[in-house]
Amino acid sequence: MATTYEHDIVAWAKEQANLLRSGQLSAIDIEHIAEEIEDVGKSEQRELASRMAVLLAHLLKWQYQSARQSSSWQRTIKEQRKAIARRLKNTPSLKTSIHDLEWLADAWGDAVSIAVSETGMDCFPESCPWTIDDILSEGWLPSMNVGEQP
């Protein structure tokens, strides 16, 4: 092995791919390859969580800043829903994440942080008040105005 994982990961990856393709299995760096494969899955999960947080933050802004609602917010909501749907279609195992209450609570926490940062408001619910079906439903928008009870 000419290049180490720690020295140059891109060159290492190319070398490992060539070794695999040429059947030189005894020469591959099994531990680091396994690590990289696991990281691919983690990366997909992070991407899904990030998109969900952005979607939820925009839904919060939509609900709590009704006077500032804009087509830009609607576009972002629509784009995030489409991106989440694509990710779930291309990686079906991620569907378990969106129904996991702990995962959703983490995404909600990130969304609230984004919404607080962007609005200066600190009045958002501690837990997500919407169902995952509503959140991902094309065209659905929360309608409760600030001051109303859910």
Image (cartoon, rainbow, N blue to C red):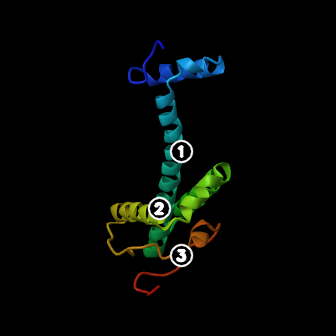
Instruction: Quickly name the residue at label 3.
Output: 142
Residue 22 lies, in percent from the top left, at 65, 16
From this viewpoint, is residue 85 visible?
yes
Q: Secondary structure at mark 3?
A: loop
Residue 87 lies, in percent from the top left, at 61, 51
Q: Amino acid at mark 1?
A: Gly
User: Which comes before the other along the chain, label 3 or label 2?
Assistant: 2
Residue 145 lies, in percent from the top left, at 46, 81
Residue placed furthest toward the bottom: 149
Residues under numbered marks 3 and 1 in contact, where contact means CB atoms less than 8 Å apart: no
In the figure, is residue 129 to the left or right of 113?
A: right
Residue at point 47% right, 30% down? 31
- Residue 19 lies in what quarter of the image? top right
Where 116 falls versus 127 (above or below)?
A: above
Q: Amino acid at mark 2?
A: Trp
User: Which comes before the other along the chain, label 2 or label 1?
Assistant: 1
Q: Secondary structure at mark 1?
A: helix
Q: Dot 3: few (<14), some (14–19), or many (≥20) neighbours within 10 Å?
A: some
Residues under numbered marks 2 and 1 in contact, where contact means CB atoms less than 8 Å apart: no
Q: Which mark is residue 41?
A: 1
Q: Secondary structure at mark 2?
A: helix
Give the distance between the C-alpha atoms of the residues marked 3 and 2, in whole angstroms. 21 Å
Q: Dot 2: few (<14), some (14–19), or many (≥20) neighbours within 10 Å?
A: some
From this viewpoint, is residue 75 visible?
no
Q: Amino acid at mark 3?
A: Pro
Q: Nearer the viewer, mark 3 or mark 2?
A: 2
Instruction: Quickly name the residue at label 2.
Output: 103
User: Which comes before the other along the chain, label 3 or label 1?
Assistant: 1
